[in-house]
């Protein structure tokens, strides 16, 4: 029995050498991810993707073009959205089969968002608590997307704030929609997610063979530990009864 | 060191069941992969229909009726134009011809489900469901359409908006339980920021640290023993 126990202990230790570091990484990354609120990580507490400009019609002196006129001009349009930019400009966003158009809602002329529009939009997306923080940089990305928004479509505006979390807003260049909000806690969360799923490249594949192998070895490691514990308890029980 | 070993063993007793659950459920997620977990094997982008006809109520008219609206979107569902009105904290859907609150018929919901399905199957089952019972973080009435493909894909359509509320497949019940067990959120809402998960996460972190410390300490003492033994043999020689 003693030899048997010693053998189990040796295997438990050997397995600990193999899986110990990864178990540690799983526990650190898991603890980090569960302790930080998901809404905070996603930027919901920093930004409001709907913006804050209400469609109060009395605020426009000129009349908004009727929807029929937009449909007549763009017969392929599958959706039409009326909204107001923070620069007080009224716009129609028109979804076409392979593209999106931004129109001046009064003249129905096509328009492109400029740096000033993007700055105003970014500040509008920010919630009230963060209003006084200055913008550190505004860049139009046309060729390469950073890994933190690899899913987005080019072109996209990158607006970086001079706050201690390095908050960055990504805004669609055509529609002016908020694509995503990133900050240092998100970046650390993404790193932890990478460690958790063990996909060190794209950080999205949860089905890698090495992760599955490590999980199987970890399960074996835990079971050997449980067996050792049961043996120990049995021995203690015997001693107690003797 | 002995007390740390005792604490490690005590924590092992406390944690063992949950750690095995984390490993088994983690393996299940990894084995199944993103697509099957989400039930999206046969799901594509829903077909968008051109609006074509202007609705009876224009966007500017509706904007005047909803002064708190942040955006108003017009689209076509089946043959009927629909407005979705984005308010500061909610979203409402309106029939763009009548101005009445939108409600989706089973026939329209079926067309919506079919428009996002790209698999080889066809609808073999449809029923009205409470989305809160079928999908995490959803509420209200909806329809479930089951397809006879290899995955037994289910598409849920929200009755309030005629939008896709979520997907399911033959693994959905098991997947749902795996998430409950992994996140320790037995309400089925998949909230991993709950107190149970947070507490056990910290305890497990301490458990792993203590395990590594014990191994490191044992290694050091073994080295010292070897050194001592070498010294003794050297002295004896």
Image (cartoon, coloured by chain):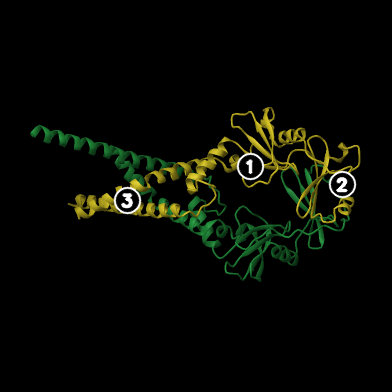
List the residue tagged with mark 2.
Answer: B60
Q: Mark 3 highlights which residue?
A: A225
Given the image, what chain letter belongs to the residue carrying mark 2? B
Residue A120 quadrant: top right
Q: Tell me what hue chain A is rendered in.
A: yellow
Viewer-nearest of discs 3 and 1: 1
Q: Position of residue B172 (x, y in %)?
A: 56, 61
Label 1: state its secondary structure: loop
Q: How many marks?
A: 3
Q: CA distance from mark 3 to mark 1?
A: 46 Å
Relative to the observer, which residue lies in front, A141 or A222? Answer: A141
Q: Quadrant of residue B231?
A: top left
> Measured along the vertical axis of the image, is residue A165 above or below residue A234?
above
Q: Residue at x 79, y 38 (%)?
A: A85
Q: Position of residue A180 (x, y in %)?
A: 65, 42
Judged left or right of residue A45, residue B73 is right
Q: Residues within 10 Å of mark 1 (few under 14, many from 20)?
A: some
- Quick one: which chain is green? B
A20 relative position to A236: left or right: right
Q: Are marks 2 and 1 in contact (CB under 8 Å)?
A: no
Same chain check for tags 3 and 1 = yes
Can you see residue A41?
yes
Residue found 75% across the figure and 45% down from its top:
B87
B149 and B74: which one is in front? B149
Q: Please report, as a chain letter, where disc 3 is located.
A: A
């Amino acid at each position: 029995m003693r030899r048997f126990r010693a053998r189990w202990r040796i295997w438990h230790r050997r397995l600990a050498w193999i899986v110990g570091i990864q178990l540690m990484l799983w526990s650190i990354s898991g603890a980090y991810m569960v302790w930080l609120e998901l809404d905070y990580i996603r930027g919901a507490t920093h930004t409001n993707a709907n913006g804050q400009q209400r469609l109060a019609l009395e605020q426009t002196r000129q009349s908004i073009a009727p929807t029929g006129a937009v449909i007549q001009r763009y017969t392929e349009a599958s959706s039409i959205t009326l909204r107001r930019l923070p620069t007080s400009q009224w716009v129609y966003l028109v979804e076409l089969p392979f593209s999106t158009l931004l129109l001046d809602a009064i003249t129905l002329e096509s328009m492109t968002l400029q740096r000033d529009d993007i700055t105003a939009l970014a500040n509008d997306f920010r919630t009230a608590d963060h209003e006084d923080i200055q913008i550190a940089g505004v860049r139009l990305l046309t060729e390469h997307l950073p890994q933190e928004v690899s899913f987005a479509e080019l072109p996209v505006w990158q607006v970086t704030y001079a706050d201690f979390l390095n908050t960055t807003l990504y805004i669609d260049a055509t529609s002016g929609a908020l694509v995503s909000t990133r900050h240092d806690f998100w970046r650390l969360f993404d790193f932890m997610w990478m460690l958790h799923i063990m996909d060190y490249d794209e950080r999205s594949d949860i089905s890698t063979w090495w992760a599955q192998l490590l999980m199987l070895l970890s399960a074996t490691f835990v079971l050997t530990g449980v067996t050792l514990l049961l043996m120990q308890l049995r021995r203690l029980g015997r001693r107690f009864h003797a | 060191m002995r007390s740390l070993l005792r604490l490690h063993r005590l924590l092992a007793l406390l944690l063992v069941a949950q750690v095995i659950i984390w490993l088994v459920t983690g393996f299940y997620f990894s084995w199944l992969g993103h697509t099957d977990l989400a039930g999206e094997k046969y799901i594509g982008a829903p077909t968008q229909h051109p609006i074509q006809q202007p609705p009876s109520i224009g966007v500017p008219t509706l904007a005047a009726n909803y002064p708190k609206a942040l955006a108003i979107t017009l689209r076509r569902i089946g043959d009927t134009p629909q407005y979705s009105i984005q308010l500061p904290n909610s979203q409402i859907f309106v029939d763009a011809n009548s101005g009445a609150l939108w409600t989706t018929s089973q026939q329209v919901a079926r067309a919506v489900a079919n428009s996002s399905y790209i698999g080889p199957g066809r609808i073999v089952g449809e029923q009205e469901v409470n989305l809160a019972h079928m999908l995490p973080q959803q509420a209200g009435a909806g329809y479930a359409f089951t397809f006879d493909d290899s995955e037994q894909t289910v598409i849920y359509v929200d009755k309030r908006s005629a939008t896709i509320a979520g997907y399911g497949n033959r693994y959905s019940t098991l997947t749902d339980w795996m998430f409950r067990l992994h996140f320790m959120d037995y309400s089925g809402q998949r909230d991993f920021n709950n107190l149970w998960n947070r507490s056990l996460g910290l305890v497990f972190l301490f458990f792993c640290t203590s395990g590594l410390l014990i191994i490191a300490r044992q290694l050091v003492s073994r080295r010292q023993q070897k050194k001592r033994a070498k010294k003794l043999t050297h002295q004896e020689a």
